[in-house]
Structures are given as structure tokens and as C-alpha cells.
Amino acid sequence: MSDIRDGAFGREDGDSRTPNHMAELGSENYEQDFALDLIRNEQETLGEIAAALGRIEAGTYGQCEGCLEEGTTGRKSLIPKTRLNAIPWARNCVECERKRETQYT
Ligand SMILES: [Zn+2]
């Protein structure tokens, strides 16, 4: 009797495990994609950080590249501290970033 019950329950478990397993597979793929995106973003971020370190060496860190290109120098080309706190490797002030985004899209 207990064998039959175990068998029945076992089969039930097996049946209910199949869709669960499929869902797990799906989430694994999703997590993999997510991880790849993270790595891609990390590599981009690392590139930006390296560029920022270069700007520190060059003494132009914290200055907006867009403003500098337009000939704006000194205090007017400085990226606001609040923006640098959020994105320490920011190349542009918000205004120039917006201009760049509208240019490239
Ligand atoms: Zn700017």
C-alpha cells in the first residue's frame, strides 16, 4: 500500500517538476543573458573609468568634453559635482550629454 502511494506521489512530483524545470531553465538563460549584459556594461564602464583616470592625469577631469570642444573652458565647463557623484566617469555635463544623445539617435 505504501509502495503504491509512494509511487503515485513520486509520479505526481515528477509531473509537477517538469514545468518547474522548464521555468528554471528559462530563468537560467535569463540570468545568463543578464550576466552577459552586466559583463558588457562592466567592460564599457571599465573603459570609461580608464578614460576618466586618463583625464585625471591630463588635468581635465571633471571638465565637460562637449563644453571644451565648443571652446568653453574654466568653471563654465565643469561637470556639476552632483553628476560626478552619481557617475564619476562622466565625460559630459547633462546639457552636452543630451546634445550628444540627440545627435546619435
Ligand atoms: Zn558640457
Image (cartoon, rainbow, N blue to C red):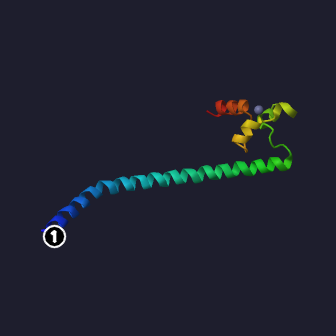
Name, please, the residue furthest toward the front: 2
- In this rendering, does residue 95 appear at all? yes
User: For the residue carrying disc 1, how many other residues have a C-alpha within 10 Å: few (<14), some (14-19), or many (20+)?
Assistant: few
Image mark count: 1
**In terms of image quarters, where does ligand 1 lie?**
top right
Which type of secondary structure does the marked residue at label 1 adopt? helix
Q: Give the vertical position of 55 relative to 102 (above or below).
A: below
Which residue: 48% across, 55% down?
32
Quadrant placement of the C terminus: top right
Classify residue 8 by image quadrant: bottom left
Which residue: 81% across, 31% down?
70
Q: Nearer the viewer, residue 103 or 59?
A: 59
- In this rendering, does residue 71 appear at all? no
**Left or right of residue 89, residue 24 in this image:** left
Which residue: 29% across, 58% down?
17
Quadrant placement of the N terminus: bottom left
Classify residue 14 by image quadrant: bottom left
Name, please, the residue furthest toward the bottom: 3
Judging by the rendered image, the residue that carries numbered circle 1 is: 3
Q: Nearer the viewer, residue 35 or 66?
A: 35
**Left or right of residue 37, residue 95 in this image:** right
**Left or right of residue 18, residue 55 in this image:** right
- Residue 2 at x, y = what percent? 15, 68
Type of amino acid at the residue the image marks with label 1: Asp
- Residue 76 at x, y = what percent? 83, 30
Q: Give the vertical position of 78 relative to 27 (above or below).
A: above
Find out if the beta carbon at label 1 lies less than 8 Å from the nearest ligand 1 atom: no
Name, please, the residue furthest toward the left: 1
- Residue 55 at x, y = what percent? 81, 47
**Left or right of residue 7, residue 88 in this image:** right
- Residue 29 at x, y = what percent? 44, 54
